[in-house]
Amino acid sequence: MAANQRQPSTDKGCRQAHNQRQDPKDLNACGDGVHRLAKPIPSSLGRSTPGSFPDAERLPGCVLFRFDAPLFFANARTFRDQVRRLARSEPTPRWIVVAAEPITDVDTTAADMLEDLDEALNARGISLVFADMKDPVREKIERYELTRTIDPAHFFPTVGAAVAAFQDQFGADWVSAAGKQAS
């Protein structure tokens, strides 16, 4: 190529795409995605999901909770409110175990919320416990110094390990939805 020849623009396609009108369906899908992140569907868990299976077995004193989104400014209040609702259930739980596998990130707003929430739960004798948390998320939890309030011993590699630790500590056994001891 001669020195005075102009090289083709590498961002021509980007300019063309920018100048094209957006399809309203794309915008609706984007808005729907943001809404799902801000308001994920909560799940209380048992040996099977109680909402889907009313006869699911439960572990008295231990609530298993899954939050299906990263924790960030747009949904930190939703997470807090859902955990507070679980903490008010009868009988009062000793542990609220967050099945954290779907939580792919925690931002500073969510970290502040977790610290305040854990302190409030601890004052009521309730422990916030995490299971299946991804290593990068756990590293952020540590970097935010949340293990000052959230007991470092309350992080478990699996939900099963958290349940076993609860059973060992409190001697709890699974019960059916009717309140009878399960096998």
Image (cartoon, rainbow, N blue to C red):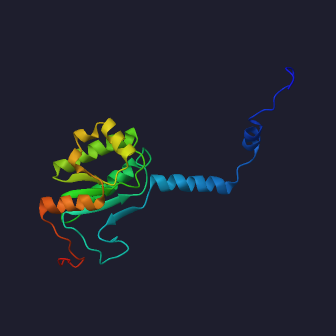
Instruction: Give x and y (percent) for residue 56.
Output: 29, 75
Relative depth, front residue between 172 and 16: 172
Residue at (47, 53) in percent of width and height? 37
Let me know if residue 138 appears in the view: yes
Residue at (81, 28) in percent of width and height? 7
Residue at (32, 44) in percent of width and height? 113
- Is 140 situated above or below 37? above
Relative depth, front residue between 142 and 82: 142
Residue at (43, 53) in percent of width and height? 69
Let me know if residue 88 appears in the view: no
Instruction: Give x and y (percent) for residue 50.
Output: 32, 72
Relative depth, front residue between 59 and 4: 4
Q: How many marks?
A: 0
* Left or right: where 36 falls relative to 158: right
Using the rendered view, name the quadrant where residue 90 is placed: bottom left
Q: The C terminus is located in which quarter?
A: bottom left
